[in-house]
Image (spheres, grey):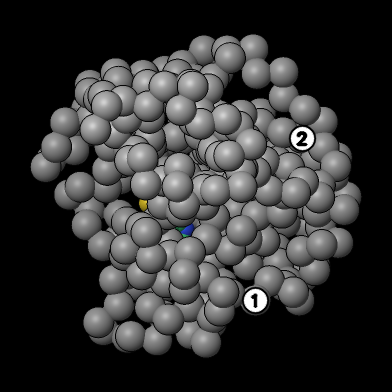
Amino acid sequence: MRPLNENDVTAEELFVNRRKFLKLGAAGLVANSAVMDLLAKEFMPKANLQYVKDSNPEQLVLNSFEQITSYNNFYEFTTSKEGVKYLAHTLKTDPWSIEIDGLVEKPFVIDVQDLIKKYTLQERIYRFRCVEGWSMVVPWVGFELSQLIKDVKVLSKAKYIRFETKYDDEMFPDQSRGLFAALDYPYAEGLRLDEAMNPLSLMAVGLYGKTLENQNGAPLRLVVPWKYGFKSIKSISKISFVEKEPLNSWQKSNPNEYGFFANVNPEVDHPRWSQKRERVLGQLFKQRTLMFNGYEKEVAHLYKNMDLTRYF
Ligand SMILES: Nc1nc2c(c(=O)[nH]1)N[C@H]1C(S)=C(S)[C@@H](COP(=O)(O)O)O[C@H]1N2
Ligand SMILES: [Mo]
């Protein structure tokens, strides 16, 4: 088939006859960015959140809403990245409470919507790099984790923050598989308190201006863009302040391959594959992976005297 050219379809036809458009085949379209933009716009969600826009100073090229919501890691549903979105409807996010406990002045439980209401939402356009070697650029909407930490009055003994995903085996099919489950649930993650206080650390409640889809970790998920994706824990129901470094789910399941820090680092390979390059969703060719995923200026100081091959 000859490659598609602008004269072949008008924008109008694209919208009224998507099936015809898809029949033309993806291969001929890859290079035609005007057509790709039109297709992406067709899938654009209706924004419902109010937030301060990110000026995107680096002019990062966004992945489409369709891409971000159709290729997911969320093992509580399935290990199939394409499958998550078809199963995620069993997650019920209203009502949803968040428990805040451990080394804080006064532990408490709060409804997630009441928590979110306290903060002015901001858009944050971040690179997102999975440890498996794929990446994307996502326009998250959320608030800084540092704001929450300041509000809960953490005791000086606290050195780490620990997050837990909800445990409910009626909502998450893989949680009911017991010994045959893909991971030991509830999914847990942690950050050193100074990492959590870094202005890049975001509590996300939406993307593309819209409340998070279940598959992306509704109603509240962490986003730490300089770390591999598994640190960005989804559907959080508990936040604890603790003295000792918490064990995260992936470290627990395979300590030789996954550590606590999980900073994106092209110089430290995964035992089974190189981390030098990554495939951006929707791109044919791989690109170079950046130190700290491109956020070296913002976070390198956090790891000044640490051997990053040891603290991986
Ligand atoms: N609770 C929970 N959080 C999770 C995961 C998971 O399986 N369960 N997968 C992690 C991994 S490996 C990645 S790459 C990202 C994927 O986020 P996305 O589906 O929104 O792209 O979520 C992270 N958070
Ligand atoms: Mo990942």
Residue 260 x, y percent position in the rendering: 36, 45
- Quadrant where the C terminus is found in the figure: top left
- Quadrant where the N terminus is found in the figure: top left
**Amino acid beneath label 1:** Lys
Residue 276 x, y percent position in the rendering: 22, 23
Marker disc for residue 122: 2
Pointer 1 and pointer 2: residues touching (CB < 8 Å)?
A: no
Identified at 71% across, 54% down, the residue is 211
Q: Residues within 10 Å of mark 2 (few under 14, many from 20)?
A: many
Residue 5 x, y percent position in the rendering: 41, 22
**Amino acid beneath label 2:** Gln
Determine whether 225 is above or below 56 in the image.
Answer: below
Residue 219 x, y percent position in the rendering: 67, 61
Between 176 and 32, the one lying in front of the other is: 32
294 with respect to 158 (left or right): left
Residue named by callout 1: 92
Q: Classify mark 1: helix, strand or loop.
A: loop
